[in-house]
Amino acid sequence: MNLARLDMNLVVALRALLEERNVTHAGQRVGLSQPAMSAALARLRRHFDDDLLARVGGHYELTALGQVLLDRTSTACDLLERLFSSQADFDPATESREFKLVGSDYAVAVFGTELARVVHEEAPGIRLRFTQPPAGVVDDTATLLSATDGLLMPHGVISDFCATDLYEDRWVFLVAEDHPDVGDRLTRADLARLPWVTYQRTYDAPAVRQLGMLGIEPHVEVSVDSFQTLPLLVAGTRRIALVQERLARAFVDIAAVRVLEPPYEAVPLREALWWHPVHTHDAAHIWLRETAVRVGSRLPAVEQ
């Protein structure tokens, strides 16, 4: 397809039409008259050879292709906005903009809080927005990265994208302070017989995949989408949880839990900032990446 022959304004019109499902409202949203938006819809219908919006009674509904295009146009518009907002120069002391970072509550608690502190001091006009990674982040990473400024995630989960390392961490286990079946050390037999509480898609974590290679199949009793909830679901129970040491140590004084070493040599954890190639040479994003690396390098080392 020859992009030079396409009117990129139609992408904006398409998004408005699919989201509003009303020609008049879509026109008002993008600043076009009703006749101009109707003309845009006609051009889009010819291009896709599909109605996109089908009248059902007194309203419009999306066709099957329209439903497919709904998510794609949103991603395309986000990417275009980021592409054309790229800057040759960036002064953090005077600029005003928002960076959207996707990361787990662990990444925000351990790294994001310090990043926000540094940004506040050095770039008062910069805003940070942290959001949780969607369940399908591994399945469609490209789409996620195209609509955000970066993804905070350790190595071993995704690959083939731009990334820079931030800091290292270790995997440890949490057990209840008064666990009746666990002493000062865990055994591999304990890992196989005790119930687990895990962070959502456990099979995405290299440390959990390592358990499978050791012949250990965790009996997952509870699964949650928050790392910071794990200690609370371990305290006062027979459950165990595999967590990052930086987070585990922070909860020892809050929840009635103990931190124990794995009964095997656990794979290390290297947290990284991942981004879409469209950001690579953008001055603002270069500043963000350099600041993130600087913040990560200043985090205290984990215990060995």
Image (cartoon, rainbow, N blue to C red):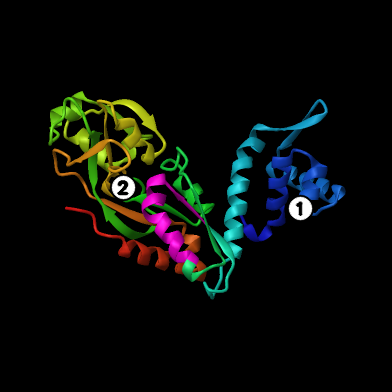
Q: Earlier in the sequence, mark 2 or mark 1?
A: 1
Residue 50 location, x and y as percent? 71, 37
Residue 282 location, x and y as percent? 51, 68
Q: Does residue 7 appear in the picture of this structure?
A: no
Total marks in image: 2
Q: Is residue 111 magenta?
A: yes
Decide: is 112 above or below 285: above
**What span is in magenta?**
100-120
Q: Nearer the viewer, residue 188 or 252?
A: 252
Decide: is 226 above or below 118: above
Q: Is residue 189 left or right of residue 279?
A: left
Which residue has dot 1 on it?
30
Q: Secondary structure at mark 1?
A: helix
How crowded pointer 1 is (Cα within 10 Å; few <14, some 14-19, many 20+) is rated as some
Which residue has dot 2 on it?
250
Q: Is residue 184 left or right of residue 72?
A: left
Q: Is residue 37 left or right of residue 249?
A: right
Q: Which mark is residue 234?
A: none
Q: Secondary structure at mark 2?
A: helix
Name which quarter of the figure residue 221 lies in: top left
Amino acid carrying label 2: it is Ala
Amino acid carrying label 1: it is Val
Residue 86 location, x and y as percent? 56, 67
